[in-house]
Image: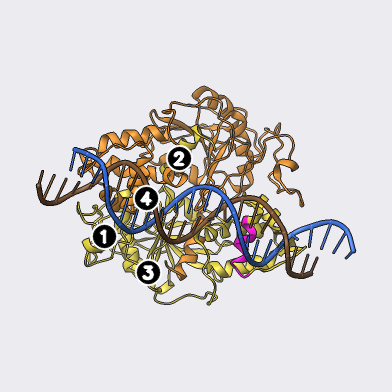
Chain colours: A orange, B yellow, C blue, D brown
DNA sequence: TAGATTGTTAATCGATTAACAATC
DNA sequence: TAGATTGTTAATCGATTAACAATC
């Protein structure tokens, strides 16, 4: 299944250069990106990690997916904790939990939990706690996980393969549509039921499957091209594992996971706990 | 090389139960962890992601490694950005950079960069900028990356293997000592020059190599055991990829990378950019 | 000197914490 | 009613931003 299409044998030199987003850095004295790069994708470079910035200031996206409207905005810090509450609630399956329990299980304070949940409109009962199922469903809806979201992975190397093999994504709201690569040896193979295809096929697949999120697991040199490919195909959310900062159009959200960065942060606290 | 030692064929039932840190959650109405779990590793559960908490409030660690003493404390948010500045500086290799350039390349504001760097004691020259090499060395020293830090990986599955194969860790300050597993089929193999050993060997290796950081890439069910094993062997910094919150003794720092959590956060911002 | 860019200050913003009234 | 636990408020803390004097 999914036999390769026009396997151009370059390392990762995609032909998608109608956006000539250079991965080189800003001209030396440009006081602002916006001024320096007039055409092409405005370089809304978003970041992640500690102080997130994991999103971009932007006009509303083309079509707002199935999300309860008219909600109070949820603080970024809260959004980042909701998935962890969700993870706990999915273990519990049913019954009632207190903020104290959720806190204990997720490593935050009970006050924090109550505060966070209050942004959802809150579903607790004083003296009793929160109903597990109701709360779980509410968080899932808030996160936009009502139905399974289609995800593509660009880069079918070690890491991409590891992700594709990871069980449990389905249960947590995601579905891998395909992996993409340029290596003819990889194209046409199937990993954990997920086809590996040539990157040329990505735009069509993204359209057809309405892919919401792209994961980049290419080598660093190819990551910007992968991002260009994804964004020009219409993907507005990117999880990037390559150790480079991406330039993406406004309205596209990028989160970064850089293993060496994580280790370096740990290295710092190794010497100064607290 | 590294032939397996007493390969007990259980899935991941390590014998390290002298800390009987249950991975089950806190007793229902314990108002504080500290009160609820009197003996064993006090469950300083630390978190990561957005609002980090990627460290623990704790008395000084046994022996402070080679770090410049008497420094002003660096804010958490700044610590999390320093590795990204470092990544950029390593590309540049030499010359001079302005805060504006660093900002452009890393996706933060120039004011932020200057503020962050001022915590290091600052090395800039007004009207000129920062000297690349000096700044890079300063950040590396601050992060405690003077010499290569030894790291172990617990769990030689897809993800552990992918990390072991990842080139570039050496250049960024780390050295993988070994991977550990309980699967006899894996033990004794070598991945990218790194031996896969039975977990029984971990404590001795940690002592011998003075391992600073442990990475957990086991299945969720085994992660708490892996953490217990690491902490009782003396490891005080853990990077956990398993989708569970770990209980660790005070003084141990844990950072979490949960792929589904990252995707879920992206799912939220997909609908509400900005 | 004129232009550039740092380092720092003060103002603002957002997140966390503690406390407690509301209420089951 | 008594005990438990939420939801919310107010106080505190920490991070970001903007502006600009210092100075190369």
Q: Which residues are magenta?
A: B112-121
Q: CA distance from mark 1 to mark 4?
A: 22 Å
Q: Residue at x 52, y 53 (%)?
A: B166
Q: Is residue A84 magenta?
A: no
Residue named by callout 4 = B242
Sort mark 4 into few (<14), some (14-19) or many (20+) by Cα contacts within 10 Å.
many
Q: Position of residue B7 (x, y in %)?
A: 28, 59
Are the residues under badges 1 and 4 in a single subunit?
yes
Q: Label 1: chain?
A: B
Disc nearer the start of the sequence (3/2): 3
Residue D11 relative to residue C24: left or right: right
Residue with the mark numbered 2: B263
Mark whose residue sits in front, 4 or 2: 2
* Figure quadrant of residue B61: bottom left
Q: Which of label 1 and label 4 is nearer to you?
A: 1
**Of B195 and A59, the residue lying toward us:** A59
Quarter that holds the N terminus of chain B: bottom left
Are the two marked residues, 3 and 2, in contact with CB atoms closer than 8 angstroms?
no
* Quadrant in which the C terminus of chain B appears: top right
Q: Which residue is mark 1?
A: B33
User: Is tag 3's residue or tag 1's residue first in the polypeptide sequence?
Assistant: 1
**Chain label for disc 3:** B
Label 3, secondary structure: give it. Answer: loop
Examine the rendered structure and indicate whether residue A110 appears above or below residue B227: above
Residue B113 lies in the magenta-colored region: yes
Q: Give the residue displayed 43% in from the left and 35% down from the top.
A: A72
């Amino acid at each position: 299944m999914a036999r390769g299409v026009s396997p151009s044998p370059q390392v990762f030199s995609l032909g998608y250069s109608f956006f000539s987003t250079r991965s080189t850095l800003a001209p030396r004295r440009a006081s602002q990106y916006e001024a320096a790069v007039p055409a092409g994708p405005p370089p809304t470079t978003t970041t992640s990690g500690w102080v997130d910035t994991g999103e971009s200031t932007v006009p509303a996206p083309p079509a707002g997916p199935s999300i309860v409207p008219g909600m109070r905005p949820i603080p970024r810090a809260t959004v980042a904790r909701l998935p962890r509450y969700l993870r706990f609630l999915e273990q519990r399956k049913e019954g009632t939990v207190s903020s104290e329990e959720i806190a204990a299980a997720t490593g935050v304070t009970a006050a924090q939990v109550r505060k966070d949940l209050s942004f959802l409109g809150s579903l607790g009962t004083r003296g009793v706690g929160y109903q597990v199922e109701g709360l779980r469903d509410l968080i899932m809806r808030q996160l936009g996980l009502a139905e399974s979201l289609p995800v593509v992975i660009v880069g079918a190397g070690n890491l991409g393969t590891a992700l594709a093999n990871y069980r449990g994504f389905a249960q947590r709201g995601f579905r891998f549509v395909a992996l993409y690569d340029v290596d003819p040896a990889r194209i046409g193979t199937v990993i954990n039921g997920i086809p590996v295809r040539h990157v040329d096929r990505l735009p069509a697949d993204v359209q057809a499957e309405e892919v919401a999120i792209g994961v980049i697991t290419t080598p660093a040199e190819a990551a910007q091209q992968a991002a260009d490919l994804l964004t020009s195909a219409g993907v507005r959310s990117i999880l990037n594992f390559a150790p480079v900062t991406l330039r993406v159009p406004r309205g596209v959200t990028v989160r970064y996971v850089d293993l060496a960065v994580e280790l370096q942060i740990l290295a710092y606290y190794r010497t100064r706990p607290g």
